[in-house]
Amino acid sequence: MARVYNFSAGPSMLPEPVLRKAAEEMLDYQGSGQSVMEMSHRSKVFDGIIVEAEVLLRKLMNIPENYHVLFLQGGASSQFAMVPLNLMVTKKKCDIVHTGQWSKKAMAEAKRYGTVRMVASSEDKNFTYIPDLTNVTFDPEAAYVHITSNNTIFGTRYRTFPDTGNIPLVVDMSSNILSEVIDVNKFGLIYAGAQKNIAPAGLTIVIIKKDLADEPQEITPTMFKYKTHVEGRSLFNTPPCYCVYIAKLVFEWLLDLGGLPAMQKINETKAAMLYDFLDGSKLFKPTVAEPHRSLMNIPFVLPSEELDAEFLKKSVTAGFVNLKGHRSVGGMRASVYNAMPVEGVKKLVEFMKTFEMNNR
Ligand SMILES: *Cc1c(COP(=O)(O)O)cnc(C)c1O
């Protein structure tokens, strides 16, 4: 069996021990005689899984008691609508920081339900940086401020989060949740699609301060109310059961590793290996400068599209897949989420060194 190093931006790699454990338990989950895919979401066995998944996530992220944890569907893309529908109730305005295609989509949806003010943008330099927010005055009448903690396409990330005072800070953390230690208390709401750092596609995690999960806008469909899922303990309707189970295994894997402080160290090591090589290279160029660099998504370019194409072709033969960059940046992008082993990055850097030597 030959596994490749998959540098996809998402869906992405899952930790091998998690896949092995899932394979072991596939036909008979802990003596139930069924796989988790087949069992009732109302069964005692599945209830044990979803309850434990929440306990483990709370432990990993140190989530305080005054927050709900929800296991939903619909991806981060549904949250672009769910957030304004549920939060813009008495106050029908929000402030958004524009740092790429995902924040653009968040703005487009929010505009359908209220007034959106773009408070800062990095579009002037093709989103290669995070705007300085120290001098931004957030609207005290805004229902929330929205940011994207890690910009998957452009490879930027917030090092520090803005202080929004009493205005709830909402964050799309899809591509860097669980990659580093964060203080949940800074946020009113955190959401993330699972397919980058948590589980297979199909699960969306929402961590929401309890006082924000009240009555939403009148028009809100039942399935789009946070309240529905709080009251239903994420079992209002059939949840993505298998994804929740894999998420639980990933949380266990992270805790065994030493939790988020240990994971962050590993991620910093992996990212430094790539950035150090890129900074010293005469051929490859990183597209983002410090202090804006992502730990998860690392875009880089070669001097010509011909060389990009040649590099990509050779990389696949060498066992590295999905290194092609997003069309809005071009070149390459190495997504090195939690599950990418250090060994994978080390081998990629060696491969890039050889490519550089052969193309001097
Ligand atoms: C992938 C991604 C999304 C889209 O997620 P879906 O689950 O496909 O809706 C949104 N925001 C960010 C930051 C992402 O990385």
Image: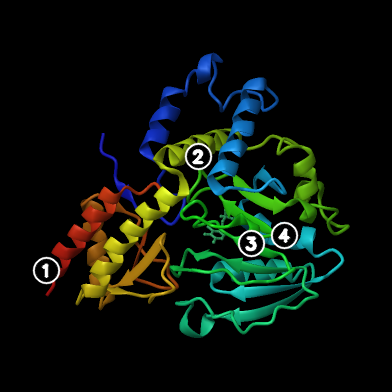
Helix, strand or loop status at disc 2: helix
Query: Quadrant holding ligand 1?
Result: bottom right
Q: Which residue is mark 2?
A: 251
Q: Which residue is mark 3?
A: 186
Q: Which residue is mark 1?
A: 357
Q: Residue at x 40, y 62 (%)?
A: 295
Q: Which residue is mark 4?
A: 83
Of 310 and 184, which appears nearest the observer? Answer: 184
Tell me if mark 2 has few (under 14), some (14-19) or many (20+) residues whose alpha carbon lies within 10 angstroms of its own.
many
Tell me if mark 1 has few (under 14), some (14-19) or many (20+) residues whose alpha carbon lies within 10 angstroms of its own.
few
* Separation of residues labelled 4 and 1 (CA atoms): 50 Å
* Separation of residues labelled 4 and 3 (CA atoms): 17 Å
Name the N-terminal-most of marks 4 and 3.
4
Helix, strand or loop status at disc 4: helix
Q: Position of residue 343 (x, y in %)?
A: 25, 49
Q: Residue at x 75, y 43 (%)?
A: 229
The answer, for residue 201, to whether it is visible in the render is yes
Q: Position of residue 213 (x, y in %)?
A: 78, 52
